[in-house]
Amino acid sequence: MKKKRQELMHEQSTAERSFTNIFGLLDLLDPQAPEEFKKRYLAIQEAKQKISDTLREKKQDLKLDELKIKVLDKLNKLDDKLSDVFFKRPGKFEKFFYPFTLLNIFTIGFLMGHKPEIFHIYYTILFFLLIPIRAYTYYKTNNHYFLADLCYYVNGMCLLFIWAFPNNISLYLSTFALTFGTLSWAVITWKNSLVTHSVDKVTSCFIHIMPPLTIHVITHVLDDTDFQRERFPAVYLSKANITNNGGWPLKTNIFYTSLYYLLWQCSYHYFITIRQSTKIQSGERMTSFEYLTKHTFKNTPILSTLLDLPDPYPMLLYILFQYLYQLITMSLCGIWFADSHAASIFLLSIFLVASYNGATYYIDYYGDQGLRKEIKKLQLEIRNIQGSDIEEDEAVR
Protein backbone atom coordinates (compact mmCIF):
# COMPACT_ATOMS: atom_id res chain seq x y z
CA MET A 1 0.00 0.00 0.00
CA LYS A 2 2.85 2.41 0.91
CA LYS A 3 4.76 1.64 -2.29
CA LYS A 4 1.64 2.20 -4.41
CA ARG A 5 0.99 5.53 -2.72
CA GLN A 6 4.60 6.67 -3.40
CA GLU A 7 4.27 5.75 -7.09
CA LEU A 8 1.05 7.77 -7.41
CA MET A 9 2.61 10.78 -5.68
CA HIS A 10 5.64 10.52 -7.99
CA GLU A 11 3.33 10.44 -11.01
CA GLN A 12 1.53 13.58 -9.81
CA SER A 13 4.73 15.49 -9.05
CA THR A 14 6.17 14.58 -12.50
CA ALA A 15 3.07 15.89 -14.24
CA GLU A 16 3.08 19.13 -12.21
CA ARG A 17 6.82 19.78 -12.79
CA SER A 18 6.23 19.76 -16.56
CA PHE A 19 4.54 23.16 -16.17
CA THR A 20 7.34 24.75 -14.18
CA ASN A 21 10.38 23.97 -16.34
CA ILE A 22 11.35 26.11 -19.37
CA PHE A 23 10.69 23.34 -21.86
CA GLY A 24 7.15 23.06 -20.67
CA LEU A 25 6.61 26.79 -21.23
CA LEU A 26 8.09 26.65 -24.71
CA ASP A 27 5.83 23.75 -25.58
CA LEU A 28 2.87 26.05 -25.05
CA LEU A 29 3.94 28.01 -28.19
CA ASP A 30 3.34 24.93 -30.29
CA PRO A 31 0.07 24.92 -32.33
CA GLN A 32 -0.90 21.69 -30.56
CA ALA A 33 -0.30 23.28 -27.15
CA PRO A 34 -3.97 23.56 -26.04
CA GLU A 35 -4.50 19.84 -26.66
CA GLU A 36 -1.24 18.94 -24.92
CA PHE A 37 -2.16 21.22 -22.02
CA LYS A 38 -5.51 19.46 -21.68
CA LYS A 39 -3.84 16.02 -21.62
CA ARG A 40 -1.39 17.09 -18.94
CA TYR A 41 -4.15 18.67 -16.91
CA LEU A 42 -6.19 15.46 -17.09
CA ALA A 43 -3.13 13.42 -16.09
CA ILE A 44 -2.64 15.58 -13.00
CA GLN A 45 -6.30 15.29 -12.05
CA GLU A 46 -6.22 11.54 -12.54
CA ALA A 47 -3.14 11.23 -10.34
CA LYS A 48 -4.76 13.35 -7.64
CA GLN A 49 -7.92 11.25 -7.82
CA LYS A 50 -5.92 8.02 -7.45
CA ILE A 51 -4.15 9.37 -4.39
CA SER A 52 -7.46 10.62 -2.94
CA ASP A 53 -9.11 7.22 -3.53
CA THR A 54 -6.17 5.40 -1.95
CA LEU A 55 -6.26 7.63 1.11
CA ARG A 56 -10.03 7.22 1.39
CA GLU A 57 -9.73 3.42 1.22
CA LYS A 58 -7.00 3.51 3.84
CA LYS A 59 -9.16 5.62 6.15
CA GLN A 60 -12.12 3.26 5.63
CA ASP A 61 -9.93 0.26 6.46
CA LEU A 62 -8.70 1.99 9.61
CA LYS A 63 -12.25 2.85 10.65
CA LEU A 64 -13.36 -0.73 10.03
CA ASP A 65 -10.45 -2.04 12.10
CA GLU A 66 -11.31 0.37 14.90
CA LEU A 67 -14.96 -0.76 14.77
CA LYS A 68 -13.90 -4.43 14.91
CA ILE A 69 -11.70 -3.72 17.93
CA LYS A 70 -14.52 -1.89 19.71
CA VAL A 71 -17.05 -4.66 18.99
CA LEU A 72 -14.55 -7.33 20.10
CA ASP A 73 -13.83 -5.38 23.28
CA LYS A 74 -17.55 -5.13 24.09
CA LEU A 75 -18.04 -8.85 23.36
CA ASN A 76 -15.16 -9.71 25.67
CA LYS A 77 -16.63 -7.58 28.44
CA LEU A 78 -20.05 -9.20 27.91
CA ASP A 79 -18.44 -12.64 27.90
CA ASP A 80 -16.70 -11.88 31.21
CA LYS A 81 -20.01 -10.86 32.77
CA LEU A 82 -21.87 -13.90 31.44
CA SER A 83 -19.08 -16.25 32.55
CA ASP A 84 -19.27 -14.72 35.99
CA VAL A 85 -23.05 -15.28 36.10
CA PHE A 86 -23.18 -18.83 34.72
CA PHE A 87 -19.84 -20.36 35.72
CA LYS A 88 -17.86 -18.44 38.35
CA ARG A 89 -20.68 -17.41 40.69
CA PRO A 90 -23.82 -19.24 39.53
CA GLY A 91 -25.44 -19.13 42.97
CA LYS A 92 -26.79 -15.60 42.55
CA PHE A 93 -28.40 -16.41 39.22
CA GLU A 94 -29.84 -19.69 40.55
CA LYS A 95 -31.53 -17.81 43.41
CA PHE A 96 -33.26 -15.66 40.81
CA PHE A 97 -34.01 -18.58 38.48
CA TYR A 98 -35.70 -20.72 41.15
CA PRO A 99 -38.74 -18.39 41.62
CA PHE A 100 -38.69 -17.76 37.84
CA THR A 101 -39.25 -21.51 37.25
CA LEU A 102 -42.04 -21.74 39.82
CA LEU A 103 -43.73 -18.69 38.30
CA ASN A 104 -43.51 -20.31 34.85
CA ILE A 105 -45.17 -23.50 36.06
CA PHE A 106 -48.01 -21.43 37.51
CA THR A 107 -48.27 -19.30 34.33
CA ILE A 108 -48.40 -22.39 32.09
CA GLY A 109 -51.32 -23.80 34.07
CA PHE A 110 -53.10 -20.44 34.14
CA LEU A 111 -52.76 -19.87 30.38
CA MET A 112 -53.93 -23.38 29.55
CA GLY A 113 -57.10 -22.82 31.57
CA HIS A 114 -57.86 -19.14 30.97
CA LYS A 115 -55.91 -17.87 27.93
CA PRO A 116 -55.13 -20.84 25.67
CA GLU A 117 -55.16 -18.62 22.57
CA ILE A 118 -51.88 -16.97 23.65
CA PHE A 119 -50.16 -20.12 24.92
CA HIS A 120 -48.11 -20.50 21.72
CA ILE A 121 -46.88 -16.92 22.18
CA TYR A 122 -45.73 -17.71 25.71
CA TYR A 123 -43.93 -20.82 24.43
CA THR A 124 -42.13 -18.73 21.80
CA ILE A 125 -41.06 -16.13 24.38
CA LEU A 126 -39.66 -18.82 26.69
CA PHE A 127 -37.86 -20.44 23.77
CA PHE A 128 -36.02 -17.24 22.88
CA LEU A 129 -35.20 -16.63 26.54
CA LEU A 130 -33.80 -20.06 27.39
CA ILE A 131 -32.20 -21.29 24.17
CA PRO A 132 -29.69 -18.40 23.81
CA ILE A 133 -28.51 -19.18 27.36
CA ARG A 134 -28.25 -22.87 26.44
CA ALA A 135 -26.31 -21.99 23.27
CA TYR A 136 -23.85 -19.79 25.20
CA THR A 137 -23.22 -22.23 28.05
CA TYR A 138 -22.90 -25.21 25.69
CA TYR A 139 -20.49 -23.32 23.45
CA LYS A 140 -18.32 -22.37 26.42
CA THR A 141 -18.19 -26.01 27.56
CA ASN A 142 -17.64 -27.46 24.05
CA ASN A 143 -21.05 -29.14 24.07
CA HIS A 144 -22.62 -27.06 21.29
CA TYR A 145 -22.95 -30.06 18.93
CA PHE A 146 -25.87 -31.11 21.12
CA LEU A 147 -27.74 -28.11 19.67
CA ALA A 148 -28.02 -30.02 16.38
CA ASP A 149 -29.98 -32.86 18.02
CA LEU A 150 -33.49 -33.87 17.01
CA CYS A 151 -35.18 -32.16 19.97
CA TYR A 152 -34.02 -28.70 18.79
CA TYR A 153 -35.00 -29.56 15.23
CA VAL A 154 -38.53 -30.50 16.37
CA ASN A 155 -38.76 -27.24 18.34
CA GLY A 156 -37.87 -25.48 15.10
CA MET A 157 -40.61 -27.41 13.29
CA CYS A 158 -43.09 -26.39 15.99
CA LEU A 159 -42.17 -22.70 15.65
CA LEU A 160 -42.25 -23.00 11.87
CA PHE A 161 -45.77 -24.39 11.99
CA ILE A 162 -46.98 -21.74 14.48
CA TRP A 163 -45.54 -18.67 12.79
CA ALA A 164 -44.91 -19.52 9.13
CA PHE A 165 -47.10 -22.42 7.90
CA PRO A 166 -50.20 -22.79 10.14
CA ASN A 167 -52.12 -24.14 7.14
CA ASN A 168 -49.63 -26.90 6.26
CA ILE A 169 -51.31 -30.19 7.20
CA SER A 170 -48.28 -32.46 6.66
CA LEU A 171 -46.08 -30.18 8.79
CA TYR A 172 -48.71 -30.10 11.55
CA LEU A 173 -49.25 -33.87 11.65
CA SER A 174 -45.49 -34.53 11.58
CA THR A 175 -44.94 -32.01 14.36
CA PHE A 176 -47.70 -33.64 16.41
CA ALA A 177 -46.15 -37.09 15.88
CA LEU A 178 -42.61 -35.99 16.76
CA THR A 179 -43.58 -33.89 19.79
CA PHE A 180 -45.91 -36.47 21.33
CA GLY A 181 -43.60 -39.24 20.18
CA THR A 182 -39.81 -38.92 20.27
CA LEU A 183 -39.69 -35.62 22.16
CA SER A 184 -41.96 -36.63 25.03
CA TRP A 185 -40.43 -40.08 25.51
CA ALA A 186 -36.96 -38.53 25.50
CA VAL A 187 -37.72 -37.24 29.02
CA ILE A 188 -37.48 -40.86 30.12
CA THR A 189 -34.62 -41.81 27.78
CA TRP A 190 -32.41 -38.86 28.73
CA LYS A 191 -33.58 -38.85 32.36
CA ASN A 192 -34.57 -35.17 32.29
CA SER A 193 -35.02 -33.80 35.79
CA LEU A 194 -37.02 -30.74 36.83
CA VAL A 195 -34.44 -29.16 39.13
CA THR A 196 -36.06 -25.76 39.55
CA HIS A 197 -32.93 -23.74 40.38
CA SER A 198 -30.85 -25.11 37.46
CA VAL A 199 -31.21 -23.27 34.16
CA ASP A 200 -29.58 -26.18 32.33
CA LYS A 201 -31.92 -28.86 33.67
CA VAL A 202 -35.03 -26.69 33.35
CA THR A 203 -34.11 -25.88 29.74
CA SER A 204 -33.77 -29.60 29.01
CA CYS A 205 -37.26 -30.16 30.41
CA PHE A 206 -38.56 -27.17 28.45
CA ILE A 207 -37.36 -28.36 25.03
CA HIS A 208 -38.95 -31.79 25.58
CA ILE A 209 -42.20 -30.93 27.38
CA MET A 210 -43.29 -27.51 26.11
CA PRO A 211 -43.62 -28.37 22.37
CA PRO A 212 -46.08 -31.27 22.93
CA LEU A 213 -47.87 -29.15 25.52
CA THR A 214 -48.20 -26.31 23.01
CA ILE A 215 -49.45 -28.66 20.29
CA HIS A 216 -51.88 -30.15 22.82
CA VAL A 217 -53.32 -26.71 23.60
CA ILE A 218 -53.63 -25.85 19.90
CA THR A 219 -55.21 -29.21 19.09
CA HIS A 220 -57.44 -30.01 22.08
CA VAL A 221 -57.88 -26.97 24.32
CA LEU A 222 -58.75 -24.75 21.35
CA ASP A 223 -60.79 -27.53 19.73
CA ASP A 224 -63.59 -26.39 17.43
CA THR A 225 -63.18 -22.68 18.16
CA ASP A 226 -63.21 -19.79 15.73
CA PHE A 227 -59.67 -18.94 16.83
CA GLN A 228 -58.44 -22.42 15.86
CA ARG A 229 -60.15 -22.24 12.46
CA GLU A 230 -58.66 -18.83 11.64
CA ARG A 231 -55.23 -19.05 13.29
CA PHE A 232 -54.42 -22.75 12.77
CA PRO A 233 -56.49 -23.97 9.80
CA ALA A 234 -54.30 -27.09 9.38
CA VAL A 235 -55.45 -28.34 12.80
CA TYR A 236 -59.12 -27.81 12.06
CA LEU A 237 -58.87 -29.40 8.59
CA SER A 238 -56.84 -32.35 9.90
CA LYS A 239 -59.38 -33.12 12.59
CA ALA A 240 -62.21 -32.90 10.08
CA ASN A 241 -60.41 -35.18 7.58
CA ILE A 242 -59.49 -37.72 10.25
CA THR A 243 -63.07 -37.77 11.56
CA ASN A 244 -64.43 -38.33 8.03
CA ASN A 245 -61.84 -41.00 7.18
CA GLY A 246 -62.32 -42.91 10.41
CA GLY A 247 -59.05 -42.43 12.27
CA TRP A 248 -55.44 -41.34 12.44
CA PRO A 249 -53.72 -41.75 9.01
CA LEU A 250 -50.79 -43.82 10.30
CA LYS A 251 -49.26 -44.77 6.94
CA THR A 252 -49.50 -41.24 5.54
CA ASN A 253 -48.18 -39.75 8.73
CA ILE A 254 -45.25 -42.19 8.84
CA PHE A 255 -44.36 -41.19 5.28
CA TYR A 256 -44.36 -37.40 5.87
CA THR A 257 -42.80 -37.62 9.32
CA SER A 258 -40.06 -39.84 7.94
CA LEU A 259 -39.30 -37.22 5.28
CA TYR A 260 -38.87 -34.49 7.90
CA TYR A 261 -36.86 -36.90 10.03
CA LEU A 262 -34.67 -37.89 7.06
CA LEU A 263 -33.97 -34.22 6.31
CA TRP A 264 -32.64 -33.75 9.86
CA GLN A 265 -30.74 -37.06 9.90
CA CYS A 266 -28.90 -36.37 6.64
CA SER A 267 -28.03 -32.80 7.63
CA TYR A 268 -26.87 -33.87 11.08
CA HIS A 269 -24.56 -36.65 9.93
CA TYR A 270 -23.12 -34.59 7.09
CA PHE A 271 -22.34 -31.46 9.11
CA ILE A 272 -21.56 -33.12 12.46
CA THR A 273 -20.65 -36.82 12.18
CA ILE A 274 -18.64 -36.56 8.92
CA ARG A 275 -17.28 -33.01 8.74
CA GLN A 276 -16.42 -32.81 12.45
CA SER A 277 -15.26 -36.42 12.89
CA THR A 278 -11.70 -35.43 13.88
CA LYS A 279 -12.85 -33.27 16.80
CA ILE A 280 -15.36 -35.88 17.94
CA GLN A 281 -12.88 -38.76 17.86
CA SER A 282 -10.24 -36.73 19.69
CA GLY A 283 -12.69 -35.98 22.49
CA GLU A 284 -12.79 -32.22 21.85
CA ARG A 285 -16.54 -32.33 21.17
CA MET A 286 -19.36 -34.42 22.62
CA THR A 287 -22.37 -35.69 20.64
CA SER A 288 -25.50 -37.59 21.61
CA PHE A 289 -24.03 -40.85 20.32
CA GLU A 290 -20.86 -40.38 22.36
CA TYR A 291 -22.82 -39.41 25.49
CA LEU A 292 -25.24 -42.32 25.31
CA THR A 293 -22.53 -44.89 24.62
CA LYS A 294 -19.96 -43.56 27.10
CA HIS A 295 -22.21 -42.36 29.93
CA THR A 296 -25.92 -43.26 29.95
CA PHE A 297 -25.74 -46.87 28.72
CA LYS A 298 -22.02 -47.58 28.97
CA ASN A 299 -22.54 -50.57 31.30
CA THR A 300 -25.15 -52.26 29.11
CA PRO A 301 -23.77 -55.67 27.95
CA ILE A 302 -25.51 -55.60 24.54
CA LEU A 303 -24.29 -52.07 23.83
CA SER A 304 -20.71 -53.02 24.69
CA THR A 305 -20.89 -55.86 22.17
CA LEU A 306 -22.24 -53.56 19.45
CA LEU A 307 -19.56 -50.93 20.10
CA ASP A 308 -16.86 -53.52 19.56
CA LEU A 309 -17.94 -53.83 15.92
CA PRO A 310 -15.72 -52.10 13.32
CA ASP A 311 -16.68 -48.66 12.05
CA PRO A 312 -19.11 -47.53 10.73
CA TYR A 313 -21.41 -50.31 12.01
CA PRO A 314 -21.94 -48.87 15.54
CA MET A 315 -23.09 -45.54 14.09
CA LEU A 316 -25.29 -47.20 11.46
CA LEU A 317 -26.94 -49.36 14.12
CA TYR A 318 -27.46 -46.24 16.25
CA ILE A 319 -29.15 -44.48 13.31
CA LEU A 320 -31.37 -47.50 12.69
CA PHE A 321 -32.27 -47.71 16.38
CA GLN A 322 -33.13 -43.99 16.44
CA TYR A 323 -35.47 -44.38 13.49
CA LEU A 324 -37.16 -47.46 14.95
CA TYR A 325 -37.53 -45.64 18.26
CA GLN A 326 -39.20 -42.76 16.45
CA LEU A 327 -41.58 -45.10 14.60
CA ILE A 328 -42.58 -46.94 17.78
CA THR A 329 -43.23 -43.78 19.80
CA MET A 330 -45.19 -42.05 17.04
CA SER A 331 -47.38 -45.12 16.47
CA LEU A 332 -49.21 -44.22 19.70
CA CYS A 333 -49.97 -40.66 18.56
CA GLY A 334 -53.34 -41.67 17.13
CA ILE A 335 -54.51 -42.21 20.72
CA TRP A 336 -53.28 -38.78 21.89
CA PHE A 337 -54.81 -37.11 18.80
CA ALA A 338 -58.24 -38.72 19.13
CA ASP A 339 -58.70 -38.35 22.91
CA SER A 340 -57.85 -35.11 24.69
CA HIS A 341 -58.12 -36.78 28.12
CA ALA A 342 -55.62 -39.49 27.12
CA ALA A 343 -53.27 -36.78 25.81
CA SER A 344 -53.59 -34.83 29.08
CA ILE A 345 -52.86 -37.92 31.17
CA PHE A 346 -49.85 -38.78 28.99
CA LEU A 347 -48.35 -35.27 29.27
CA LEU A 348 -49.02 -35.22 33.01
CA SER A 349 -47.17 -38.54 33.31
CA ILE A 350 -44.16 -37.13 31.45
CA PHE A 351 -44.17 -34.07 33.72
CA LEU A 352 -44.35 -36.28 36.82
CA VAL A 353 -41.38 -38.35 35.59
CA ALA A 354 -39.32 -35.16 35.19
CA SER A 355 -40.48 -34.00 38.64
CA TYR A 356 -39.57 -37.35 40.20
CA ASN A 357 -36.12 -37.18 38.61
CA GLY A 358 -35.75 -33.66 40.01
CA ALA A 359 -36.78 -34.81 43.50
CA THR A 360 -34.28 -37.67 43.28
CA TYR A 361 -31.56 -35.17 42.38
CA TYR A 362 -32.38 -32.92 45.35
CA ILE A 363 -32.60 -35.77 47.86
CA ASP A 364 -29.47 -37.53 46.64
CA TYR A 365 -27.36 -34.39 46.25
CA TYR A 366 -28.38 -32.46 49.33
CA GLY A 367 -28.86 -35.65 51.34
CA ASP A 368 -25.26 -36.58 50.61
CA GLN A 369 -24.17 -33.08 51.58
CA GLY A 370 -26.02 -33.35 54.90
CA LEU A 371 -24.51 -36.77 55.52
CA ARG A 372 -21.04 -35.42 54.85
CA LYS A 373 -21.60 -32.59 57.32
CA GLU A 374 -22.74 -35.04 59.99
CA ILE A 375 -19.71 -37.26 59.34
CA LYS A 376 -17.40 -34.26 59.67
CA LYS A 377 -19.07 -33.28 62.95
CA LEU A 378 -18.69 -36.83 64.25
CA GLN A 379 -15.04 -36.93 63.22
CA LEU A 380 -14.41 -33.62 64.98
CA GLU A 381 -16.09 -34.88 68.15
CA ILE A 382 -13.99 -38.07 68.06
CA ARG A 383 -10.81 -36.00 67.70
CA ASN A 384 -11.85 -33.80 70.63
CA ILE A 385 -12.57 -36.87 72.79
CA GLN A 386 -9.27 -38.46 71.82
CA GLY A 387 -7.46 -35.21 72.55
CA SER A 388 -9.02 -34.90 76.03
CA ASP A 389 -8.13 -38.56 76.81
CA ILE A 390 -4.49 -37.93 75.90
CA GLU A 391 -4.38 -34.85 78.13
CA GLU A 392 -5.81 -36.87 81.08
CA ASP A 393 -3.21 -39.62 80.57
CA GLU A 394 -0.38 -37.09 80.59
CA ALA A 395 -1.76 -35.47 83.76
CA VAL A 396 -1.85 -38.88 85.54
CA ARG A 397 1.74 -39.58 84.55
Image (tube, grey):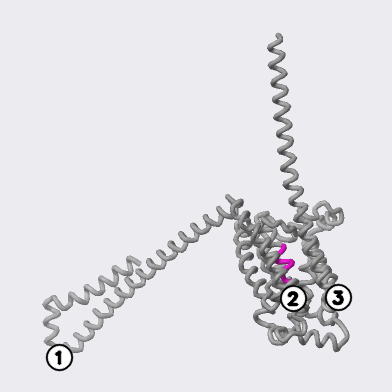
Quadrant for the C terminus, please: top right
Whether residue 315 is situated above or below residue 260 in the rendered picture = above
Marks 3 and 2, Cα distance to the nearest angstrom?
16 Å
Q: In the orientation shown, which residue stands out farthest toward the top?
A: 397
Query: Which x, y percent locates residue 22?
Result: 11, 77
Query: Which x, y percent locates residue 307?
Result: 81, 56
Residue at 71% from the left image edge and 10% from the top image edge: 396
Badge 3 is on which residue? 335
What type of secondary structure mainly makes up the magenta span? Answer: helix
Q: Nearer the viewer, mark 3 or mark 2?
A: 2
Whether residue 351 is situated above or below residue 266 in the rendered picture = above
* Front residue (pair 125, 148): 125
Quadrant for the N terminus, please: bottom left
Q: Specify start and end residues of the magenta stretch as a single range.
A: 205-211
Local crowd size for mark 1, using a 10 Å CA cut-off: few (<14), some (14–19), many (≥20): few
Local crowd size for mark 2, using a 10 Å CA cut-off: few (<14), some (14–19), many (≥20): many
Whether residue 189 is situated above or below residue 251 in the rendered picture = above
**Which amino acid, mark 1?**
Pro
Query: Which x, y percent locates residue 109?
Result: 72, 69
Q: Which mark is residue 31?
A: 1
Counting residues from the start of the chain, the first of labels 1 and 2 encountered is 1
Q: In the orientation shown, which residue stands out farthest toward the bottom?
A: 31
Numbered disc 3: secondary structure: helix
**Which amino acid, mark 3?**
Ile
Left or right: 217, with 35 as reference point: right
Counting residues from the start of the chain, the first of labels 3 and 1 encountered is 1
Residues at circles 3 and 2 in contact by the CB criterion of under 8 Å: no
Left or right: 282, with 21 as reference point: right
Give residue 258's quadrant in the image.
bottom right
Left or right: 181, with 64 as reference point: right
Badge 2 is on which residue? 217
